[in-house]
Image: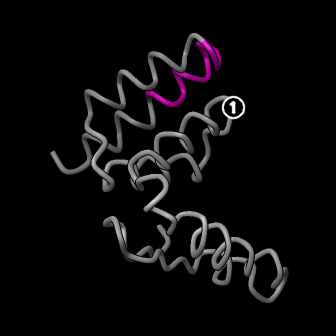
Amino acid sequence: MTQTEGIMAGKKIVQTAGRQALGSFAPEFAHLNDDILFGEVWSRNDLLSLRDRSLVTIVCLIAQGITDNSLVYHLKTAKENGITQKEIAEILTHAAFYAGWPKAWAAFNLAKTVWTEEE
């Protein structure tokens, strides 16, 4: 998992995943990921809360069929941002009708792991 600081509202997100994974190979992409997407867009929590950003991001990833480590990362972040197990279950159930049943199944399997890790 990457290092993310400032999950609470009002704090700037510090992301280093791009630089750690691709910094020397694709420095501009790393910059856009770490500084623009997370450093600027995700840090505009006066316009949209981190919780809501997590919800939107998860649904977008599921709709595209992305159920790799990026969805796991965003599920963990959603949990840190206050989305409960009951809420993620309802979010995924709702998304299943619009994004696709198999995509929701895949997301449920990942979410179940994330929400039961510490319990």
Q: How many numbered discs? A: 1
Residue at 54% x, 22% y: name it. 104
Q: Is residue 29 above or below residue 83?
A: below
Q: Is residue 75 above or below residue 87?
A: below
Q: Position of residue 16 (x, y in %)?
A: 57, 80
Residue sitting at the far front: 47
Give, as a single range, the part of the protein colored magenta. 98-108
Residues 36 and 33: in front is 36
Chief secondary structure of the magenta portion: helix
Q: Is residue 113 above or below residue 78?
A: above
The image quadrant that residue 24 belongs to is: bottom right
Amino acid type indicated by mark 1? Gly
Q: Is residue 36 magenta?
A: no
Q: Is residue 95 left or right of residue 8?
A: right
Residue at 43% x, 62% y: name it. 46
Residue at 57% x, 10% y: name it. 97
| Residue denoted by label 1 | 65
Q: Is residue 73 left or right of residue 88?
A: right
Which quadrant, please, contains the C terminus?
top left
Q: Is residue 75 above or below residue 28?
A: above
Q: Is residue 111 left or right of residue 63?
A: left
Q: Position of residue 65 (x, y in %)?
A: 69, 31
Q: Position of residue 62 (x, y in %)?
A: 61, 32
Residues 16 and 49: in front is 49
Residue at 72% x, 33% y: name it. 64
Please tell me whether mark 1 sits on a helix, a strand or a loop.
Answer: loop
Q: Position of residue 102 (x, y in %)?
A: 61, 17
Q: Is residue 100 magenta?
A: yes
Residue sitting at the far left: 119
Q: Is residue 45 left or right of residue 88?
A: right
Q: How is the image coloured?
A: one colour
Residues 15 and 72: in front is 15
